[in-house]
């Protein structure tokens, strides 16, 4: 966990330092960066098994003009097991983390009617990695009927429809996915800093159960 935290700190430090350089050097004006965080809301089928959790995001890209840009974004999103569904029927428990790296096109209007308020739409796609850590004390009871939640946690089902009694400590699955959303900005300084509120719909073709989640993030953008 400490390595993950230190890695996030380095990313956040990078996206903060670059805009400061951009404000002093004319050649860096096409650069855009963002850093933020918030809550992630899973939708069905993901929402059947997991609830609201936190997220953190960072990104960097280039502006073609005052309206069009592209950016590469990183997103971490936690997925909290739905306790009401999991514990009463002796299903697995543990932690689930979603990591995404996407390339996105953004169309923005930085000033509405000459004000400091702006809007933008964004969309793209990329790589989605869902990693699961299962409670090591959990043992699948014999002849447990296989249900989608067990596939999510990484357990396999046999030909008779029962969960295979195999110890699974962690499980990861990679898939392609798409994201689309919109944001609202407030200009903070004349150098390009903006406060933003953003929501994106994310869909990934993950194994067994697709990953569907809407991160709602707030933070700061430059350019």
Image (tube, rainbow, N blue to C red):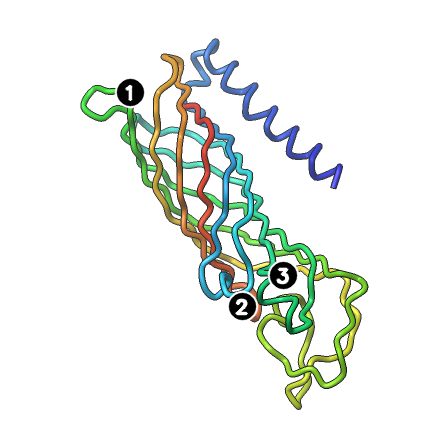
Q: Position of residue 151 (x, y in %)?
A: 62, 71
Q: Are marks 2 and 1 in contact (CB under 8 Å)?
A: no
Q: Position of residue 123 (x, y in %)?
A: 38, 46
Kindly identify which residue carries mark 2: 209
Which residue is painted at 55% across and 64% down in the image?
A: 49
Kindly identify which residue carries mark 3: 173
Q: Secondary structure at mark 2?
A: loop
Q: Residues within 10 Å of mark 3 (few under 14, many from 20)?
A: some
Q: Position of residue 88 (x, y in %)?
A: 64, 70
Which image quarter: residue 13? top right
In the image, taking residue 137 as reference, residue 134 lies left or right, namely left
Which image quarter: residue 155? bottom right
Q: Residues within 10 Å of mark 2 (few under 14, many from 20)?
A: some
Q: Position of residue 84 (x, y in %)?
A: 58, 64
Q: Residues within 10 Å of mark 1 (few under 14, many from 20)?
A: some
Q: Could you say which disc has been placed on residue 147 in the image? A: none
Q: Could you say which disc has been placed on residue 116 in the image? A: 1
Which residue is painted at 54% across and 52% down in the image?
A: 127
Establish if 191 lies above or below 11. above
Distance between the alpha carbons at the discs numbered 3 and 1: 42 Å
Distance between the alpha carbons at the discs numbered 2 and 1: 42 Å
């Amino acid at each position: 966990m400490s390595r993950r935290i230190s890695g996030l700190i380095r990313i956040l430090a990078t996206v903060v330092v670059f805009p400061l350089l951009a404000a002093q050097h004319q050649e860096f004006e096409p650069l855009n960066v963002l850093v933020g965080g918030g809550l992630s809301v899973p939708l069905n089928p993901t929402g059947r098994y997991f609830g609201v959790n936190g997220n953190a995001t960072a990104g960097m890209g280039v502006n073609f003009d005052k309206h069009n840009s592209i950016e590469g974004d990183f997103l971490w999103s936690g997925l909290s097991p739905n306790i009401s569904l999991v514990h009463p029927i002796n299903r697995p428990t543990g932690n689930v983390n979603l990591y995404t790296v996407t390339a996105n096109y953004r169309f923005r209007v930085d000033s509405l009617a000459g004000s400091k308020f702006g809007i933008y739409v964004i969309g793209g796609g990329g790589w989605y990695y869902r990693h699961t850590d299962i409670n090591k004390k959990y043992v699948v009871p014999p002849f447990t009927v296989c249900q989608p939640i067990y596939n999510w946690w990484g357990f396999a089902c046999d030909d008779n429809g029962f969960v295979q009694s195999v110890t699974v400590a962690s499980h990861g699955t990679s898939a392609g996915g798409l994201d689309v959303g919109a944001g609202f900005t407030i200009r903070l300084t004349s150098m390009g800093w903006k406060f933003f509120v953003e929501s994106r719909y994310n869909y990934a073709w993950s194994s067994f159960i697709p990953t569907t989640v809407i991160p709602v993030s707030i933070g700061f953008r430059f350019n």
